């Protein structure tokens, strides 16, 4: 089935996003090219490269500087020296890597691609160090200029996936999430795709999975739809809205059909619906992304289907079904609340048959605390409320 994927027309912010990823690639390539063969096989060096593909916080103006300082501290730790200033660290870095040029300029560069969650970092680094020899081989393949991109991608991704999952607090995390940013940066052809939460929706849209076949399918999108390299593909995957191969008819889900909540596009985009171009507001996706991030930082992985989120075992033996709405005030907001009420009872009836009777609680997520009459209405129906106050998630139920 052929899908008409949208054309990549980056905004000014998205072009800056791509430029930042390309700068990260230059940074990692500079370190790799300056390293000796011995250094390229050191577990500590491989771990450093992996970390340099991450951002410490969300990439805004303050976030870039936080990530730069965090990255430089990792470099200082690798060199086993203090981090007193950029100039001092540049001198130490040049001594450790004599072939490295303009070390001070590198240390002032803002880098990072994937906002990798703090809870996942220690387990990922332990995984990288345990499998450093194989990962170093995958890195060497990624840097090759002799292999054709398709063969390079297939071999590299298969080497990483054969290592198995990263096990963190009962969760299975794909190593592709944490490692492909560095791999993409090392590829001189800029064709090796980044594969993480941002690309999950795009993979679904083209009927692929996060494996070597999916990586090749993503690679084949480069050169099409205005996408010139793997970094533009990464931003495209994060910001566009894609059609779906899934059938639209409702189905009763089994436990195995639940999937982790994926990252949603928050940018305003244009969709073709019944031959009319309709501007879609992404406030709903922004709200569900906030919930997803808040939960993932607490090692909770929400599930989704036709509903927005399901938190399994949020209390012993109980599950919480959540529907997000962007407003609760005025006629439009009241309409959204009524819609959410109907959706929650419908979704619990149609999708929760796999759970014991009465084991699924209901909640509405709002961007802010609603008026008292809305709170009273939902309380009378046994529906919980969740809302955000700055960065904190508040509500009538604790998570």
Image (cartoon, rainbow, N blue to C red):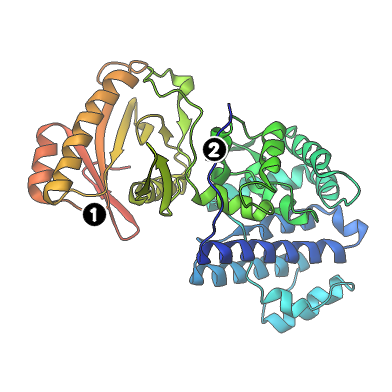
Looking at the rendered structure, the secondary structure element under dot 2 is: loop
Q: Residue at 43% across / 17% down in the picture?
A: 254
**Percent x, y of residue 283:** 34, 51
The vertical placement of 165 against 183, above or below, is above
Relative to residue 387, is residue 342 depicted above or below? above
The answer, for residue 378, to whether it is visible in the render is: yes
Q: At numbered mark 1, what does the secondary structure look like: helix, strand or loop?
A: loop
* Residue 359 showing in the rendered view: no
Q: Which residue is mark 2?
A: 4
Cα distance in 3D space between marks 1 and 2: 37 Å
Image spot of residue 381 (x, y percent): 13, 31
323 on left or right of 82:
left
Contact, CB < 8 Å: mark 1 with mark 2?
Answer: no
Q: Where the N terminus falls, by quadrant?
A: top right
| For residue 294, side relative to residue 347 (left or right) | right
Q: Nearer the viewer, residue 114 or 88?
A: 114
- Residue projecting furthest to the front: 275
Q: Please tell me which residue is depicted at 41% across the width and 32% down the height of the picture.
A: 304
Q: Which quarter of the rendering shows the C terminus?
A: top left
Nearest the viewer among 388 and 328 is 328
Instruction: Name the quadrant containing residue 97.
Output: bottom right
- Which residue carries the number 1 mark? 368
Task: Please tell me whether mark 1 or mark 2 is closer to you in this view.
Answer: 2
- Residue 100 location, quadrant: bottom right
Give percent across and percent down for residue 233. Answer: 62, 50
- Residue drawn 30% across and 36% down? 322
Q: Position of 373 compared to 94: left or right?
A: left
Q: Residue at x 72, y 84 (%)?
A: 87
């Amino acid at each position: 089935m052929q899908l008409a994927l949208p054309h990549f027309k980056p905004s000014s912010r998205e072009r800056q996003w791509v430029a930042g990823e390309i700068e990260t690639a230059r940074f990692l390539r500079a370190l790799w090219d300056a390293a000796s063969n011995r250094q390229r096989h050191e577990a500590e060096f491989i771990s450093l490269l992996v970390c340099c593909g991450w951002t410490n916080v969300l990439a805004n103006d303050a976030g870039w500087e936080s990530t730069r300082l965090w990255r430089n501290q990792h470099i200082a730790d690798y060199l086993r020296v203090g981090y007193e200033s950029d100039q001092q660290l540049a001198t130490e870095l040049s001594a450790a890597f004599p072939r490295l040029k303009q070390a001070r300029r590198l240390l002032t560069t803002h880098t990072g691609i994937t906002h990798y969650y703090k809870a996942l970092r220690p387990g990922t680094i332990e995984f990288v160090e345990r499998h450093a020899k194989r990962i170093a081989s995958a890195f060497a393949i990624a840097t090759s200029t002799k292999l054709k991109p398709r063969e390079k991608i297939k071999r590299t991704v298969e080497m990483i996936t054969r290592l198995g999952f990263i096990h963190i607090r009962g969760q299975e995390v794909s190593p592709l999430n944490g490692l492909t940013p560095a791999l993409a940066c090392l590829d001189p052809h800029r064709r090796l795709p980044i594969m993480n939460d941002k690309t999950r929706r795009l993979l679904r849209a083209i009927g692929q999975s996060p494996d070597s076949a999916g990586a090749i399918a993503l690679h084949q999108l480069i050169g099409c739809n205005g996408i010139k390299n793997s970094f533009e593909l990464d931003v495209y995957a994060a910001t566009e809205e894609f059609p779906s191969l899934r059938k639209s008819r409702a189905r009763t889900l089994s436990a195995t059909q639940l999937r982790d909540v994926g990252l949603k596009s928050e940018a305003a985009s244009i969709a073709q619906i019944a031959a009319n171009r309709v501007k879609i507001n992404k406030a709903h996706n922004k709200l569900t992304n906030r919930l997803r991030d808040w939960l993932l930082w607490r090692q909770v992985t929400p599930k989704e289907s036709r509903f927005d989120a399901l938190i399994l075992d949020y209390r012993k033996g109980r599950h919480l079904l959540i529907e997000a709405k962007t407003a609760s005030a005025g006629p439009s907001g009241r309409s959204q609340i009524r819609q959410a009420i109907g959706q929650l009872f419908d979704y619990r009836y149609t999708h929760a048959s796999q759970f014991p009777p009465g084991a699924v609680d209901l909640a509405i997520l709002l961007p802010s605390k609603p008026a008292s009459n809305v709170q009273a209405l939902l309380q009378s129906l046994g529906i919980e409320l969740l809302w955000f106050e700055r960065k904190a998630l508040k509500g009538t139920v604790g998570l």
